[in-house]
Amino acid sequence: MKILWLAPYPLNPEHHPAPWIMMLAREIAGCGHQLMIVTPSSKIKEPIIYDTGLGYQVTALPYQGGLVHLLTLFGTQIRAIRRYLGKYAQNYDIIHVHGTEIQLASSLIGPLMKTPFVISIQGIISLYLKALPEWLSKRRLYWTLTSYHEKREIRLSNYFFCRTLWDSRFVKQVNPSAVIFKCWELIRSEFFEYSHLFFSKDILFMGGDNPLKALRHCLRVFNQVAKGRDIKLHIVGSSDLKKILTLSSRMGLSELGPQNLIVHGRQDATGIIRIYASCFCLYHPSLIDNSPNSVCEAQVAGLPVIATSVGGVPDLLEDGQTGLLVQKDDLEGHVSALEKLLDDQTLQRRLSDNARKLARNRHDKTMILERTISAYQNIINRTHA
């Protein structure tokens, strides 16, 4: 099978924000399928084609970014990919679009596109926008424009990969005739190899300063949990200690300081696992999410998870069985859940064991690969029937 992916893919793959894309690409190529990944970049002037050495190739397409990109409603990128597809799309059996966040599928929509394509739903910007706590920001402007493209892409496309009831319902609401294939994402092997030990007292927060991951709420909750306890909050993601200390001071959180806040920045799988060993849970107080990989990875590894019951998260864990679910605005409920889990190692072990079994089955590599290839073939057969 000849497969073309449209996906975000950095020119330096070691810094990839979604390593599961590379994992799935290696597996598909390893089955003997021909795979090309096409990614747009505003940082280059000429197309770059390179062999990854992993069985597949990558083509980076240049487009004009900045103000022109914005004023054309992202048209510079859409046209750049459309020109490429006009030349090469017919050489492929199927096109797989990874996500609706950066207008990749907009280049496919039109009567001239004969090659079948499927869109993977990742985040849903149209719904994320409603939860965004920023009102006057560049992000809100870009997401408002993205929401327009996202809904149009879903409305005018036929086939979708979804993972949760939440994303499936959104697709069906926008496009009642959509054909949906359910398929989860691959999880890095390091998390399958980890074995959690139940002696740690710290908390892990994986959101960095992403406003939707609710760092402010996390700090408020931890400020209460930390009273009278020798416990630390480990923060992974884009942020730094100075900014968080300044934020804590402005919020009047007197229990927080350098003695109990540890900021790790971005981490690879090995770094995340090293932090797991110091923590009794992953605390994920997100304002909205589909199926966050941080939660899935923790479950696979056996690190207990406490998460807000938002978006697709309830599809990942059952309250009291494979994790603890808390309501988004219930600060005291969050505090209570953390304190309960901290003091109950029997509960920690039960959640860990149940989640490991569930998540390792859900993210089974062989099953995900088979479902992906089967869906591709199904779509091709439907197109040529």
Image (tube, grey):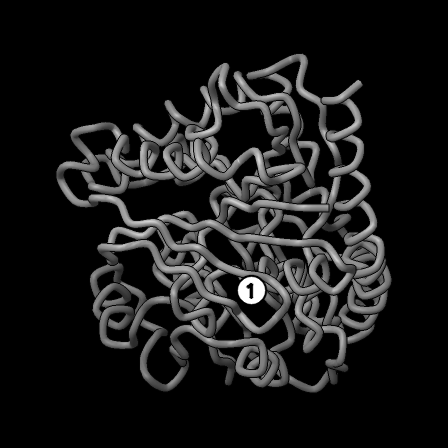
What residue did someone put label 1 on?
19
Q: Could you tell me residue 249's position as x and y percent?
A: 23, 67
Q: Residue at x 21, y 45 (%)?
A: 65
Q: Residue at x 66, y 54 (%)?
A: 34
Residue 9, picture quadrant: bottom left
Please identify the quadrant where the C terminus is shown: top right
Q: Decide if residue 73 is on the left or right side of residue 371.
A: left
Q: Decide if residue 117 is on the left or right side of residue 182.
A: left
SS label for mark 1 = helix
Q: Residue at x 32, y 32 (%)?
A: 79
Residue 340 in sight: no
Q: Residue at x 47, y 22 (%)?
A: 109
Residue 311 or residue 153, whichever sits in front? 153
Residue 160 or residue 304, whichever sits in front? 160
Q: Residues within 10 Å of mark 1 (few under 14, many from 20)?
A: some
Q: Could you tell me residue 247's position as x and y percent?
A: 25, 64
Q: Could you tell me residue 319's position as x and y percent?
A: 75, 49
Q: Is residue 102 above or below residue 240?
A: above
Residue 325 in sight: yes
Count every numbered label the image shows and give the total: 1
Residue 95 or residue 236, whichever sits in front? 95
Kind of residue sitting beneath label 1: Pro
Q: Could you tell me residue 207's position as x and y percent?
A: 45, 60
Residue 30, picture quadrant: bottom right
